[in-house]
Each structure stands twice: as C-alpha cells, then as structure tokens.
Image (cartoon, rainbow, N blue to C red):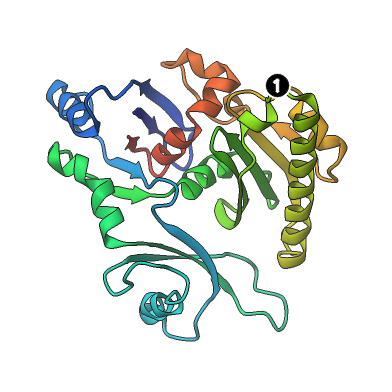
C-alpha cells in the first residue's frame, strides 16, 4: 500500500507532505484499520484508484442531447462494449476540451465506466475499516494530474509511463485529459537479459510512440505537442535519448522537482522514487487529498 498527501492551491506549487509505502501483511482492511487507529489519516479527504481491468475508459462522440441527459445516453451507447450490467454500472463523462472540433467532426467525450460489483469491491476494505472515501478514481486521471503540472503554456503534453505491468501514454492540454493509449510493453521486457530481444522491444516502443503521436496530430491538429515526458520504473537506461533519436517531438525524463516541492520527503529528489510513486502522488493531486 502506498499513501501520499499533497497540499497546495491553484496559485501555489503543490507540496508532497507525506509519502509512505508498506507491505500488506494481513490485507488492506487490517492496514486501514491500523492507520485509522493511529490517527495518521484523520482529517484528510481520501481517494483510491481502480485497478487495471476493473473499469473501462472509452472515447465516444458527444451525444446530441441536453447535458443533464448525456450520462444516460452514453450509458446505452456502451451496451455492446462492456460485459457488466449497465443499468447498475457506475458511469462518468469527461469532456475532451478544445477550441472546437474541426469542421464536420463531432465533439468527443471520454466515458469512464465500471460494474457496480467492481466498485463495491474496491471500496469494501475502506468501508470495513470505517475509513470514509471521498472518491474512487482511475490511473489515467492520476497520471493526468501529474502531466498537467509539466505542460508548457498553450501546448499539449504527451506523457509516457512504463512500469512492470505495461505502458500508458496520455495526451493532456490545459490540464485536461485528451487521449490515452495503453500497451503491454513493460520495464521487464525493456530491461531483459537478451540484447536482441531488448532491441526488438525498444523498436516496438518507438513505433508505438510514433504512431500514437501521428494519431494525436491527425485527431487533434489544433493542439501542438511541445514534448514527450517519460517516467520508467524500474529505470530503463538511455531510453529517453533513444526515443528522442526517432521522434520528431523532444523527449524529456520526468523530474517533479521542477514543479512540486517535497521538503518532508527528500527521497523524492530521486526521479526513480518519483516514478515509483507517480500514481499515488497523482491521485493525491486530485485536490490536495491523501491517496491510498
């Protein structure tokens, strides 16, 4: 379990005031009960993240209905795309912001959906431990929160996060999520012992990044992308420079010290420690909450 607490308003730099990780010896509920008993999480608004495979994020055209009817209209648009009952599913809608879609194109939305049972299971340890939840969020939005801090003015940012389970590439603009690409390329493959296999995986990654950037450019030509920021955990040596050699957009390694303060957590001066805890920090950036 990883917990992070972030404070800071819209006119000040965020500050990570607390970051802690520990092994779950007897499960989430027991760990949360201990945290509640010690008072460590008292007074915080608490957010947790859904896990991979527990939800869907789908891009759809915005339906031509009044805003208050949009969620229900999109609920039924998902009917053929998910396997869980939609009448009881949790559904939320994220606008894809822009100055207006190109002529002839309908505005798009991102629809987050999850089966009722999946959401209940995610919240169950908190309920059992009598720890109130402010929100159940998703990793894409946690990554969006970090990427938003690294954007250049009036420019889009591509953010590539790679860990043991795979990769997530997000496009953000004006602090909002525009598009997401996921893939199965993970750090174990990029750091494998077979040099030829590593080279093939990196070739696939370069191709995936190039195709995604080209696709972003076609769909969102009004959003100029200023750079690609990458974060890998464990570290993949020289990956940024290798991607930069084959990409028309500048590639930079993530360094949160340029946009976030963390005097209480000096370990965060290490970009690898930042990458390891990126989603917890991103979840806490939802509004200065604690994230578990």
- Disc 1: which residue: 193
In the image, residue 169 sits, relative to residue 259, either above or below, namely below
Q: Using the rendered view, name the quadrant where residue 239 is placed.
A: top right
Q: Using the rendered view, name the quadrant where residue 33 is placed.
A: top left
Given residues 46 and 242, the one toward you in this image is 242
> Measuring 33% from the left and 42% from the top, which residue is drawn there?
48
Dot 1 crowding, Cα within 10 Å, few <14, some 14–19, many 20+: few
Q: Using the rendered view, name the quadrant where residue 264 is placed.
A: top left
Q: Quadrant of the N terminus?
A: top left
> Measuring 56% from the left and 17% from the top, which residue is drawn there?
269
> In the rendered image, is residue 35 in sight?
yes
Residue 188, position as x, y percentages in the image: 61, 29
Residue 189, position as x, y percentages in the image: 66, 32
Given residues 29 and 223, the one toward you in this image is 29
Q: Secondary structure at mark 1?
A: loop
> Measuring 43% from the left and 68% from the top, which residue is drawn there?
82
């Amino acid at each position: 379990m990883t917990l992070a607490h972030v404070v800071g308003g819209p006119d000040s730099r965020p500050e990570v005031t607390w970051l802690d990780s520990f092994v779950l010896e007897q499960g989430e509920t027991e760990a949360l009960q201990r945290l509640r008993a010690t008072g460590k999480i008292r007074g915080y608004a608490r957010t947790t993240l859904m896990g991979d495979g527990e939800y869907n994020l789908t891009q759809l055209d915005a339906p031509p209905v009044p805003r208050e009817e949009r969620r229900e209209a999109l609920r039924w648009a998902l009917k053929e795309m998910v396997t869980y009952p939609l009448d009881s599913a949790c559904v939320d809608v994220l606008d894809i912001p822009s100055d207006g879609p190109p002529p002839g194109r309908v505005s798009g939305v991102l629809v987050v959906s999850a089966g009722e049972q999946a959401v209940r299971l995610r919240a169950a340890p908190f309920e059992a431990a009598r720890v109130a939840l402010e929100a159940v969020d998703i990793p894409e939005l946690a990554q969006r929160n970090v990427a938003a801090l690294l954007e250049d003015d009036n420019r889009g940012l591509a953010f590539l996060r790679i860990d043991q389970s795979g990769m997530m590439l997000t496009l953000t603009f004006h602090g909002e999520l525009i598009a997401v690409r996921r893939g199965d390329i993970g750090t174990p493959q990029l750091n494998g012992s077979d040099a030829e296999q590593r080279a093939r995986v990196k070739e696939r990654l370069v191709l995936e990044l190039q195709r995604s950037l080209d696709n972003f450019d076609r769909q969102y030509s009004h959003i100029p992308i200023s750079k690609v920021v990458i974060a890998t955990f464990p570290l993949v040596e020289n990956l940024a420079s290798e991607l930069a050699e084959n990409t028309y957009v500048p590639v930079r390694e993530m360094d949160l010290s340029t946009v976030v303060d963390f005097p209480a957590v000096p370990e965060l001066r290490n970009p690898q420690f930042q990458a390891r805890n990126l989603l917890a920090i991103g979840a806490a950036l939802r509004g200065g909450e604690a994230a578990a």
